[in-house]
Image: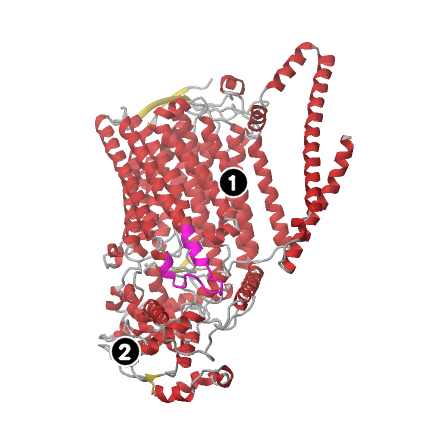
């Protein structure tokens, strides 16, 4: 028998991440509540660039995903990893580097996103210097985790750690893949891929950010904290094995379900559909193993708020992972996509699964590292009920809103006209639902602050144990194997092979889908009349990106009668070949803009951006007065042209030298047209609004407006 | 006897399907009352088929029961009394309980020590319960779905792609709209439109104007981004036919939207008529006149009764000429 060794669990780093989780959870949901209220009361955009919905929305998603859930992951991993491996962390320096590095990234995001510095890739909005910082910190986390695994005293890796490893490797691959970009300046870059290819890669990333940042690490946490809290054995080891490998292999393929009925080739869309359907069982494997672990403990679930939070979390996970595949069926997606149904769906996952599991872990973990009891079970129970009500009040109105709006979009009169030809009618109809959703959000926030109070009181009543003494026998490398053991035990003793195995599993799907799209030219049929953006239009496009217009407007007319009648010819993949980044969007709070060009006069846009309600009474779009006040900065234009040419946009040699003059010339033309319509203003031609109008008037005009059947 | 019913079944089913198909055919052909609905023979046949099916099901259950009994006797003969009693006990267990056990295949909590593995991770133990059979079945079914789906849409040409689906949708809609329009008499278009004068029609016209046109032409038609509607100057003609046409097809190069896909002919008729009533109202802040002076009286005399054919050739180039 090996020598029993003494060591200490490091709770100091766990406490740091726990505090960060508590703080950024509050930030994330409060910013979310602001965004929700802005949809009901547009005045809450405060007519200020930094607080306008288009910039607030990515701030909310980034804060909720990377600051709240991210810190939650690290809190849980640093606590459980040490205990599951019977060792302390590999490096105290890496602990600190990881923690402070991650918080610095969050700070950088909180500054740059409101400033409009964004790549516009959803959930990957941060610009390239921050992307590099994320890579550095993530690698530090990986080294720290693997160092810990290698010096473990436990022979076998528990299922939670398989999930941590898969998380780490997949997030690494995704982060690099989706942030291949060429810098133009410190805070501006263009992605290497354009249009359809960019879209496919973004949603390979976007979908798997949900899979490998919001799901797999949290499954790992569930596998540790749920059996601990319930004090019950895990239901089925076999189920853990099968659902782990099936989940990570299949998940990665499902990204194209975010692009159903878009210009993505049909074969890729279908792969997205069928792999989403095949995901039901592997996802439910996790839910089953969680819920069935509670067999024999259901009497305690009634009393223990921690178990209640966990049960609702796992159930929400099961619901969301069933709903997701259903939404991936094309005929269902035709109804749900671009509506609030999707928003409702993701919030079942985030508020229910991520939120409630985090709350359960916090209620369980904080009293332990502070060597005390939870301050109030009653308050925790109150939090549970307020939070559950909050989720229901949040999601049910959004489902209702999504169905209502979708049906209104698609409703025709018998003589062949759209029943609701004015898009705005379909928006004003659902504003009451938006208000109810904000009520749900308020409840959830209220419950959250009840938890904060309870936890602070708990912390104050206890004494923190930074280093917790523990002992375990040293590991004897060969002692693990024995006759008749399950075949999977072999790889559980070999972290490197486990890492390689999961890397292969997650690479296959991505490669099968992305390689043909990127390598084979005829996946995107060329259209002769599609030309690169002019210098001014390019500037306008970057303003469109800066203002986050993509948060509410799509640029993707799907091949439905209800869309071609409303917007015009459906979008073709060949139209987007110069779109870096692609701007198809994923939500239509306002109408689609892909065929906006030449639809309204320039002056309409000018007035509309200044005050949308002047052109569309009742509109909930924010006002953009700064576009009219601020001068356009053309200084980066030559560099932008040069970078885009490097990436393959056929700008003529030497165009970068003429670009500024060309932009000014086109700006003068737009300004002249505005003046003709009676719009006055000093130096009108120098204002940002001119560039934005030039871009909006270009949108979707490259192909003839006359219908082109098929193709 | 049982054999006969079983043989009859496959014969009856196609017969039933045929009758349904025949009805569908008939309904599509003429829409007259389907022959079979009030036909005595059909209902007799249907009743007979129903009875036979129910009888067959009852018979099959009876057969199943007999087989179970025979099996129990076999167990008694081969394995003795104890095994027999155990088997009988199992058969007494309610059907759903047995199904539940079979499809979950879980070791009960009381016996979980039997499947406890020697794993211990910080006090967490693991059981070796089998994969739930219903879960495995679901997994296989979804894999089957994937294979069938990809085969249907991609490995064969059976399923329609997105573009093809769109063409089909448009065709269906076109047919439905034409069928509807065929039932509507006297459609208004730019060749036969005359100005409405009834108050109800003009009021609807005003509502349409306020909702759709006022943003550019002003609430009182005084003009804004778009031209003034209240003076006698018109860029694209001031006759009701011209106005109707401008509304319908728009002037895209100048920012005027084509409303034909957003407003019905009747609605365009009403709003055009309402616009004509704005002429001469002199609202405040009126935009300066644009276009050519138009004398309404002369025109009205020229075309007393708007009859269609004579003007049909004119609209083609009217737009360009009026510019």
- Secondary element at image label 2: helix
Left or right, A22 with respect to B131, comes to: left
Q: Earlier in the sequence, mark 2 or mark 1?
A: 1
Q: Which mark is residue A280?
A: 1
Left or right, B11 with respect to B218, comes to: right
Q: Nearer the viewer, residue A697 or B180?
A: B180
Residue A497 visible to the viewer: no
Residue A588 visible to the viewer: yes
Quarter of the figure with residue A453: top left
Quarter of the figure with residue B71: top right
Residue A129's x, y, as percent? 34, 54
Chain to which mark 1 belongs? A
Residue A423 belongs to magenta span: yes
Do the CB atoms of the residues marked 2 and 1 lie less than 8 Å apart?
no
Q: Which mark is residue A675?
A: 2
Quadrant the C terminus of chain A occupies = bottom right
Q: Nearer the viewer, residue A391 or A184?
A: A391
- Secondary element at image label 1: helix
Alpha carbon separation for disc pair 2 and 1:
59 Å
User: Which stretch did the figure color magenta?
Assistant: A402-426
């Amino acid at each position: 028998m090996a020598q029993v060794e003494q060591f200490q669990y490091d709770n100091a780093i766990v406490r740091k991440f726990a505090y960060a989780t508590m703080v950024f959870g509050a930030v994330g949901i409060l910013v979310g509540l602001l965004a929700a209220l802005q949809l009901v009361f547009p005045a809450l955009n405060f007519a200020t660039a930094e607080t306008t919905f288009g910039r607030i929305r990515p701030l909310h998603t980034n804060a909720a995903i990377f600051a709240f859930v991210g810190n939650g992951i690290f809190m849980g991993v640093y606590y459980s990893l040490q205990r599951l491996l019977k060792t302390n962390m590999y490096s105290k320096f890496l602990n600190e580097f990881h923690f402070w590095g991650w918080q610095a990234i969050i700070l950088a995001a909180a500054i740059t996103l409101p400033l409009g510095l964004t790549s516009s890739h959803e959930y990957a909005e941060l610009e390239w210097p921050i992307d590099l910082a994320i890579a550095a910190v993530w690698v530090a986390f990986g080294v720290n985790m693997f160092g810990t695994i290698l010096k473990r005293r436990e022979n076998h890796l528990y299922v939670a750690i398989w999930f941590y490893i898969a998380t780490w490797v997949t997030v690494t691959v995704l982060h690099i893949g989706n942030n291949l970009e060429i810098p133009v300046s410190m805070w501006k870059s263009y992605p290497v891929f354009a249009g359809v290819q960019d879209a496919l890669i973004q949603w390979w990333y976007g979908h798997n950010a949900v899979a490998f940042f919001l799901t797999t690490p949290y499954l790992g946490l569930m596998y540790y904290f749920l059996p601990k809290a319930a004090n019950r054995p895990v239901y089925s080891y076999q189920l853990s094995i099968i659902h782990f490998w099936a989940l990570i292999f299949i998940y990665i393929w499902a990204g194209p379900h975010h692009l159903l009925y878009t210009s993505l080739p049909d074969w890729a869309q279908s792969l997205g559909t069928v792999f989403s359907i095949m995901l039901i069982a592997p996802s439910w494997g996790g839910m089953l193993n969680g819920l069935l672990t509670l067999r024999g403990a259901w009497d305690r679930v009634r009393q223990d708020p921690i178990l209640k939070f966990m049960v609702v979390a796992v159930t929400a996970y099961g619901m969301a992972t069933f709903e997701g595949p259903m939404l991936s069926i094309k005929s269902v997606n035709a109804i749900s996509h671009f509506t609030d149904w999707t928003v409702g769906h993701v919030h079942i996952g985030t508020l229910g699964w991520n939120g409630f599991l985090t709350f359960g872990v916090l209620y369980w973990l904080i009293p332990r590292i502070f060597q005390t009891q939870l301050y109030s079970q009653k308050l925790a129970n109150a939090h549970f009920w307020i939070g559950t009500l909050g989720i229901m009040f949040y999601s049910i109105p959004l489902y209702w809103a999504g169905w209502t709006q979708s049906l209104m979009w698609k409703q025709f009169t018998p003589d062949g006209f759209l029943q609701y030809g004015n898009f705005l009618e379909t928006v004003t109809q659902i504003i009451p639902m938006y208000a109810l959703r904000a009520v749900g959000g308020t409840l959830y926030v209220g419950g959250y602050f009840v938890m904060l109070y309870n936890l602070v009181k708990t912390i104050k009543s206890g004494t923190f144990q930074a280093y917790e003494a523990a002992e375990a026998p040293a590991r004897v490398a060969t002692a693990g194997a024995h006759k008749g053991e399950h075949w999977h035990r072999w790889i559980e003793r070999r972290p490197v092979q486990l890492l390689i195995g999961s890397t292969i599993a997650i690479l296959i799907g991505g490669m099968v889908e992305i390689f043909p799209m990127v390598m084979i030219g005829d996946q995107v049929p060329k259209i002769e009349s599609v030309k690169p953006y002019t210098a001014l239009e390019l500037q306008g496009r970057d303003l469109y990106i800066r203002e986050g217009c993509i948060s509410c407007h799509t640029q993707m007319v799907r091949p439905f009668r209800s869309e071609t009648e409303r917007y015009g010819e459906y979008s073709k993949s060949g139209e987007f070949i110069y779109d870096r980044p692609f701007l198809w969007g994923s939500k239509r709070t306002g109408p689609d803009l892909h065929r906006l060009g030449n639809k309204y006069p320039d002056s309409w846009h000018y007035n509309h951006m200044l005050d949308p309600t002047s052109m569309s009474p009742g509109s909930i779009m924010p006002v953009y007065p700064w576009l009219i006040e601020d001068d356009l900065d053309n200084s980066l234009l030559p560099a932008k042209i040069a970078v885009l040419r490097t990436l393959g946009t056929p700008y003529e040699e030497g165009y970068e030298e003429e670009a500024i003059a060309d932009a000014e010339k086109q700006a003068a033309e737009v300004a002249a047209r505005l003046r003709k319509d009676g719009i006055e203003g000093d130096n009108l031609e120098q204002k940002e609004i001119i560039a934005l109008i030039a871009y909006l008037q270009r949108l979707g005009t490259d192909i003839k407006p006359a219908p082109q059947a098929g193709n | 006897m049982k054999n006969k019913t079983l043989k009859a079944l496959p014969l009856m089913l196609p017969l039933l399907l045929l009758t349904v198909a025949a009805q569908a055919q008939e309904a599509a052909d003429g829409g007259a009352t389907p022959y079979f609905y009030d036909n005595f023979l059909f209902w007799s046949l249907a009743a007979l088929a129903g009875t036979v099916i129910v009888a067959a099901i009852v018979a099959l259950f009876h057969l199943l029961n007999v087989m179970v009994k025979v099996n129990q006797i076999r167990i008694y003969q081969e394995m003795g009394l104890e095994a027999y009693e155990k088997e009988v006990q199992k058969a007494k267990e309610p059907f759903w309980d047995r199904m539940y056990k079979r499809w979950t295949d879980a070791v009960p909590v009381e016996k979980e020590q039997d499947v406890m593995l020697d794993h211990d991770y910080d006090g967490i133990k693991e059981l070796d319960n089998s994969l739930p059979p219903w879960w495995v079945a679901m997994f296989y079914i979804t894999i089957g779905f994937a294979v069938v789906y990809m085969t249907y849409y991609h490995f064969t040409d059976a399923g329609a792609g997105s573009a093809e689906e769109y063409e089909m949708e448009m065709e269906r809609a076109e047919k439905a709209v034409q069928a509807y329009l065929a039932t509507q008499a006297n459609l208004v278009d730019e060749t036969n439109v005359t100005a409405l004068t009834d108050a109800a029609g003009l009021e609807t016209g005003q509502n349409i104007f306020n909702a759709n046109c006022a943003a550019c032409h002003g609430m009182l038609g005084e003009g804004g981004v778009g031209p003034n509607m209240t003076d006698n100057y018109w860029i694209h003609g001031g006759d009701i036919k011209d106005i109707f046409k401008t509304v319908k097809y728009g002037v895209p190069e100048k920012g005027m939207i084509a409303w034909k896909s957003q407003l019905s002919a009747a609605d365009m008729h009403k709003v055009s008529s309402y616009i004509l009533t704005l002429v001469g109202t002199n609202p405040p802040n009126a935009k300066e006149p644009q276009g050519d002076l138009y004398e309404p009286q002369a025109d009205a005399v020229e075309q007393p009764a708007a009859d269609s054919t004579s003007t049909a050739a004119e609209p083609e180039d009217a737009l360009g000429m009026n510019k």
